[in-house]
Amino acid sequence: MLKLQFSLLLFLLLTSFSKAQNKNGVPPVIAEKDLTSYLFVYFTGNSVEEEAVRYAISADGYHYYHLNDNKPILDSKIISSTGGVRDPHILRGDDGKTFYMVLTDMTSSKGWDSNRAMVLLKSTDLVNWKSNVVNIQKTFPGNENLKRVWAPQTIYDAKAGKYMIYYSMQHAGGPDIIYYAYANKDFTALESEPKVLFVPKAKNACIDGDIIEKDGVYHLFYKTETNTPGIKVATTTDLTSGNWTENDNYLQQTKEGVEGSSVFKLNHSDEYILMYDVYMKGKYQFTKTKDLEHFTVIDNEISMDFHPRHGTILPITRSELKALIAKWGKPAAYPQINNNPVLEGYHADPEVLYAEKTGKYYIYPTSDGFDGWGGYYFKAFSSDNLVDWKPEGVILDLKKDVPWAGRNAWAPCIVEKKIKGKYKYFYYYTGAQKVGVAVSDNPTGPFKDCGKPIVATRPEGIKDGQEIDPDVFTDPKTGKSYLYWGNMYMGVAELNPDMVSLKPGTTKVIAVNDSYREGTYVFYRNDKYYFMWSEDDTRSPNYKVRYGISDSPLGPIVMPKDNIVIQGNKEQGIYATGHNSVVKVPKKDEWYIVYHRFSYPTGINMGDAAGFHREVAIDKLEFNADGTIKQVVPTHAGINPVKKN
């Protein structure tokens, strides 16, 4: 897990140099590295059939492919009061997993002054939406002369701790003005009457507001509707202060009429795209910027197999993309979707298990992303095919469940045992640099700690190292189970039949060469015992896995000449592939290695913090005819779904 006994000074240096993407030393809700694609939400035209929400997806932010044969993904007649919706805006919530969409409730065939309402929608999966209509005129007195309510959008106001919905309204005799109101907790209504958000200093009309925050400054892009119409921007550091600094320059890079501007940040980049609807030409124009002030046209880099009107683009994760594809199908021209990393978020030290009780695979990782390896809880994930993983939640919380530890929850392992005809699960883990064990009747818990560490001191004669990184192995020849552990040494002891205590007098140290650092893993194949371990430091790009072979679970270990199991692939930007486990497909000689690596693509630029911002990947493990292991080349593509039979 971590280098031998780092001092407090070194710890402070590490955390001060950390470029971690988190707040207060804890993992972010959504890690930037997990945003791998884009969802484009739009409508297509002025006929009632076209005034509906449609979806498209992109792998790179430049090339877009429609979903559902470019048909609506929501029925406008069901969600709206007019039978049509326009100007869809989508937002990821502050919790990272809730989505908010707002729409103009309008059919243009009834006239541009015909609507008084908007539609509010909420979802947790981008597929299923709950909707509510908010009619401003009917809900709030004093709006009898209201003519129209256009282009609502949503932003989370951190100062207020609420979701702000902002939109333009026009009352008889006045210009269009951008108003705002906060949504209620359930996002089903507005909690108070609209207030003015922004009016240009010229007092002219403005519509189609779009706000994005960058470096603590809110940028409001909007369209002027009088004099010379076009896209402008105003900035503020306080959304509701009324103190806006206006940029007098027009931002559109065309002489054609434009509307519906929208800005989004490109994934894994410091660049933004400002796009706007060139509505008289039936197309969009895309421009690129780093400072949100100077824009370069990139139309020749953009492609779409549809013709959108006034929409927005949302960066999404691979699991969110897969949910969309599962519902509406994968466009034929959409590029291959990678399967590594297999878990989103920051995770490390993965232990993999195939459970006979459930017929499923499970991964038990270190919860990573905490500054200085400061995680304190363990999670589990389940899968039917080693590719699609379901979060099973926290299965052990050291602060709540383990009084003797409470911190530094690292590198777990697990074994399934059938005892008196009943499956039991013994979960070994590192807590406060000691090894503990917790027990459950199910692979996803709840797990109950045994009340004290099973390993708390170094083996006799060992002066350096840490009591971390447990591994459990049951010998298929004898039925005996062994616990391995150690940093800078490989310790082993036989477990008693109760699986929660060590058999007295069996603790020993297995000799390995200087390549051994930590992360022992043992498995059995064709009458041979394979020992794996990690070399170097988890903060090092050169962290790798080596192996040896033995005729016994207690050694001695013989190391083949070329004994690297897996190491980084610089050409692919993959680094620090280490601390692994291995799984065999039931009834097949088919094997897979589960390991962690620096988070891609951000980790290599984090310095030492890359060592606690890691991700879990799976690749195939293959053997030569003589039983030696073929070196694994780590991939982004990962593996195909595995069939158990």
Image (cartoon, helix red, strand yellow):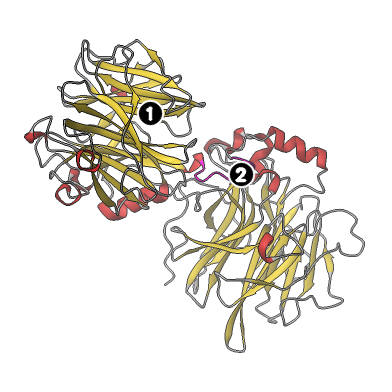
- Range of residues picked out in magenta: 23-31
Q: Is residue 109 left or right of residue 68?
A: left
Residue kind at label 1, given as amino acid type: Ile
> Residue at (84%, 68%) from the top-left corner?
508
Find disc 2 in the rendering and name its residue. 613
Name the residue at 68% across, 61% down: 398
- Dominant secondary structure of the residues highlighted in magenta in the image: loop
Q: Is residue 417 above or below residue 117?
A: below
| Residue 29 painted magenta | yes
Between the C-alphas of marks 1 and 2, the distance is 31 Å
Badge 1: residue crowd in 10 Å (few <14, some 14–19, many ≥20): many
Kindly indicate the quadrant of the structure image that contains residue 43. top left
Q: Is residue 308 magenta?
A: no
Extreme residue in the left direction? 109
Inspect the image, locate mark 2, and give the three-letter code of the amino acid beneath it.
His
Q: Position of residue 341 (x, y in %)?
A: 50, 49
What quarter of the picture does the C terminus occupy? bottom left
Number of the label disc, if any, that sits on residue 211: 1
Residue 63 in picture, x, y percent from top left: 31, 33
- On screen, residue 224 above or below 102: above
